[in-house]
Image: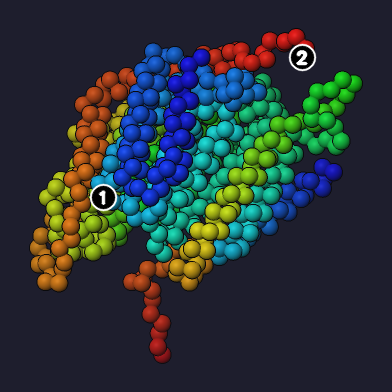
Amino acid sequence: MELLVASAIGILTAAGLYLVMRLRTFPVILGVSLLTYAVNVFLFASGRLVVGAPPILRDGVSTYTDPLPQALVLTAIVISFGMTAVVVMIALGAYLGSNDDRIDDPVPMDEVIPEDPS
Amino acid sequence: MTHWIVLPVILPAIVAPFIILAARYHIGIQRVFSIVGVLALIGIAAGLAWQASDGTITLYQLGDWAAPFGIVLVGDRLSTVMVLLTAVLALFVLLYAIGSGWDERGRHFHALYQFQLMGIMGAFLTGDLFNLFVFFEVLLIASYGLMIHAGGNERLRAGVQYVLFNLLGSTLFLFALGAIYAEAGTLNMADLAVRVQSIDVGESVGIRVAAVLLILVFAIKAALVPLHFWLPSSYAEAPAPVAALFAIMTKVGAYAIIRVYTIVFPPDLEVTAGLHTTWLLPAALVSLAIGMVGVLGAKKLDRLVAFAVIGSMGMVMIAISLFTPGSIAAALYYIIHSTLSAAALFLIVDLVRTSRAHLGLTLEPPVSGTVLIAALFFLAAIAMAGLPPLSGFVGKLLIMDAAFSTSSMAWIWSVILISSLISVVGFSRAGSILFWKAQSVEPTDEAEVVAGPGALSYIAVGGLLVLLTAHTVFAGIGHRYMQATAAQLFSPEPYISTVIETAGKLSEPKEGY
């Protein structure tokens, strides 16, 4: 199970980082979402992976799972969900306004090298 | 237990929804409530700072749960000074926003402004790393709204960059927190300080990675090279009052580095040895150099000020990376100076913008009200470039004095002195093109007469400059206070014992549990 979770985090992070470097808003937002999924699973695993164990103290139970990372993950999910919604709205506004979904700054007009007509 | 210390977070959190719900169509009422809220914040912050000035550490357990199980707010000298600085800065920026009419150019300026203050105050007061993350998100989500206030294509594009960069930073923050929790099993700063000490040096890989990830996150916030790329275009494109308020946001990163790396990972801790001297100091030197070269090379006035912010953050980080009580005191003195002067410069840029066709550093007819704006620019540029007699010079002197006996003194002195020269040239070039040479250009006939900014705008800028002057005149008192603050940071035992040993609800076992 450790291998499965670790490779899932790794693949999600790698895919997310690749998409983030695409410099167009849609792939970048997808990439950021993948990164937040990866970090949610990572946070979950930071309390050690235990299957089928209760998170609160009970009589006659010796193995527990750590409840705190679950609370942290819940907070992180809510925050990243809200942030993704905000960035989608702002990116849509920017795209509709300038009809261009590139993220990097455009080259200023006085620095554009005119194409050689010949 | 008094509840005063939680008020800097609660008060804006009440004022902001009230503004949205009750006064959304009445800009006048919004303004009144916003100003009254900020004035009350100043009062509370001054009270807290007075309470902490004798070295008392105020602890507030939210819900009366004892640390490390509950979230705590901690007020010591450092956090109360930063809270007071934020509140005072917020007042003048708010006055400018009202005087220049920026708050009318989009919706919900005042509500977002209050939420922004809530996030910043919370980040300064919290004693828990995950709570710090949450307050970072609060201040960021409000800053996204403020950043694109009043709209416009350029601003939206810069806003997208700003939001995406900070989303990546937040994700990195979560990775760092997960790594810390996996290694230490707690996220309370005082509890972490105890547990990190007991980690064996041989098994410190995880906590080392976590410490580096965490400093990367804070370096993004503090716009340290090579993580500064988000700053120039977002600060240049943001509405002027927002950019001026953002002057405190880079300091939140610097504050977090000071806080976490004095209490949790102190400089003499073996598992994170070498982090500050090997990595932080060169990055800070490069930041200072790049910022000041950017000041010289900028083609627009707003970019010029943005690069000056990067340079001054480099200066702050140089002092922080030395991690001695003297250098931290110098860094804190410089943080106050840098916040006030950067805010004043962003507001002056807006004064220039209101009466000029564009902000490009090209020859244009003189702007209306040139003499007054030029004088303000002159003063603020002197402060930012660190020339005598204003506080930038005192701050720089303190930092160079703190670096005097270290092994990297030659590097630090030469970078600081050369970059100061470059920034002086940069600022005088900009000033002479904007205000001096402009006198030789004949105004064109079709140039329409633009109404100048209102008196309130000038009062706001002047107020910031008066504060800077006071910061210079009372430099002795200020620096002594910062020395006491640094001394408190370098002997964290009272902080740790106050946080951990104060009992809360259910600390004593009760009947039936």
The color scheme shown is: rainbow
Which disc, if any, is residue B189? none
Seen as rendered, the residue at the extreme right is A60
Question: Mark 1 is on which residue type?
Answer: Ser
Say which of A88 and B320 sits in front: A88
Residue where numbered disc 2 is placed: B513
Asked if residue B179 lies left or right of residue A53, the reply is left
Residue where numbered disc 1 is placed: B100
Residue located 40% across and 29% down the image: B83
The answer to whether marks 2 and 1 mark residues whose Cβ atoms lie closer than 8 Å is: no
**Residue B309 in the image, given as x and y percentages of width and height:** 36, 45
Residue located 54% across and 34% down the image: B132
Q: In the rendered image, which quarter contains the C terminus of chain B?
A: top right
Please, which chain is the residue tagged with disc 1 on? B
Q: Quadrant of residue B433?
A: bottom left
**Residue B428 in the image, given as x and y percentages of width and height:** 20, 50
Question: Mark 2 is on which residue type?
Answer: Tyr
Q: Looking at the image, is B415 positioned above or below residue A13?
A: above
